[in-house]
Amino acid sequence: MVSGNDRKQCRQTKPEESSNMLTGMKMICAYTRLSEATILDLIVNADFPARKTKGADGIWISNTSSIDRWSQQFSEAKN
């Protein structure tokens, strides 16, 4: 049984987010067709929507919907 405190700590994932989830830098790179170095640069300098999970062996995660929205906004900002 999950206690009230545990429930607060659990991140609620929307159904569309979980089905569009990209786990690992390889999946993110494959989806965007960009190199790991470019993705890391965009995360630091252009608010690319990806984050690394906590822990020593953190995994990069993102989702296709967030990347698509970011890409549209990034393209519009460059024009």
Image (cartoon, grey):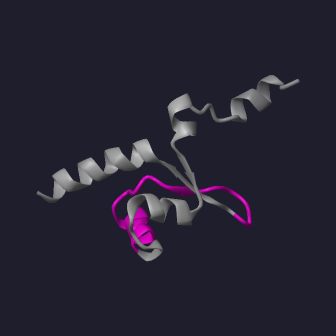
**Magenta stretch in the rendered image:** 38-57
Residue at the image position 64 percent from the left and 60 percent from the top: 59
Quarter of image, res 32: bottom left
Q: How many marks?
A: 0
- The answer to whether residue 1 is above or below residue 60 is above
Residue at the image position 54 percent from the left and 56 percent from the top: 51
The residue closer to the viewer here, 7 or 21, is 21
61 horizontally vs 45: left or right: right
Q: Is residue 41 magenta?
A: yes
Residue furthest left in the image: 79
The residue closer to the viewer here, 74 or 29, is 29
Indicate the position of residue 29 as horizontal and vertical percent values.
46, 65
Name the quarter where the C terminus is drawn: bottom left
- The answer to whether residue 69 is above or below residue 2 is below
Q: Is residue 58 magenta?
A: no
The residue closer to the viewer here, 5 or 33, is 33
Indicate the position of residue 63 as horizontal and vertical percent values.
49, 47
